[in-house]
Image (spheres, helix red, strand yellow):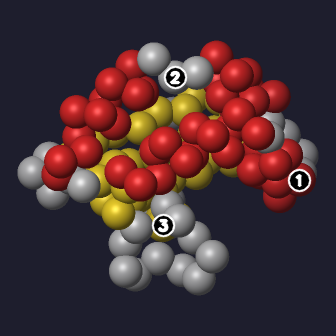
Amino acid sequence: MKRYGSVIGLGPDAIAEYKRLHADVWPGVLKMISACHIRNYSIFLKEPENLLFSYFEYHGSDFEADMKRMADDPETQRWWDVCMPLQRPLDTRAEGEWWANMEEVFHHD
């Protein structure tokens, strides 16, 4: 199992809509997240900076293949089409990232 954390901005006018969408995530999207071996997935919002922090645990054996499977899923693509315009990627993110990956510097079970 590997843990992942990432961060992205959220437009100030998008907070209510983002919360509404994530209060009722489409069942097909949730099913795909689970099918791609993602567990314990959470998104946190920090206001007034309007930063979203994502955390999940990956329990599979081929992260790249599972992320491609998710990205190729038509329902997930439609979900992203709704959510991505609300998000504000960080200028400091690495090339190819939408959500900026974060380094884990501490963990305690």
**Where is mark 2, residue-wise?**
25
**Where is mark 1, residue-wise?**
65
Q: First in sequence: mark 2 or mark 3?
A: 2
Q: Looking at the image, which residue is at 81% across and 48% down? A: 72
CB atoms of marks 3 and 1 within 8 Å: no
The kind of residue on which mark 3 rests is Ala
Task: Give left or right: position of 35 versus 44.
Answer: right
Q: Position of residue 106 (x, y in %)?
A: 44, 55
Q: Looking at the image, which residue is at 18% across and 48% down? A: 13
Q: Looking at the image, which residue is at 41% across and 38% down? A: 43
Q: Relative to 30, is 84 above or below?
A: below
Q: How far is disc 2 from disc 3 in space, using C-alphas?
A: 22 Å
The kind of residue on which mark 2 rests is Val
Q: Position of residue 42 (x, y in %)?
A: 46, 33
From this viewpoint, is residue 107 visible? no
Q: Relative to 44, is 4 above or below?
A: below
Q: Secondary structure at mark 2?
A: loop
Q: First in sequence: mark 3 or mark 1?
A: 1
The kind of residue on which mark 1 rests is Ala
Q: Position of residue 61 (x, y in %)?
A: 89, 46
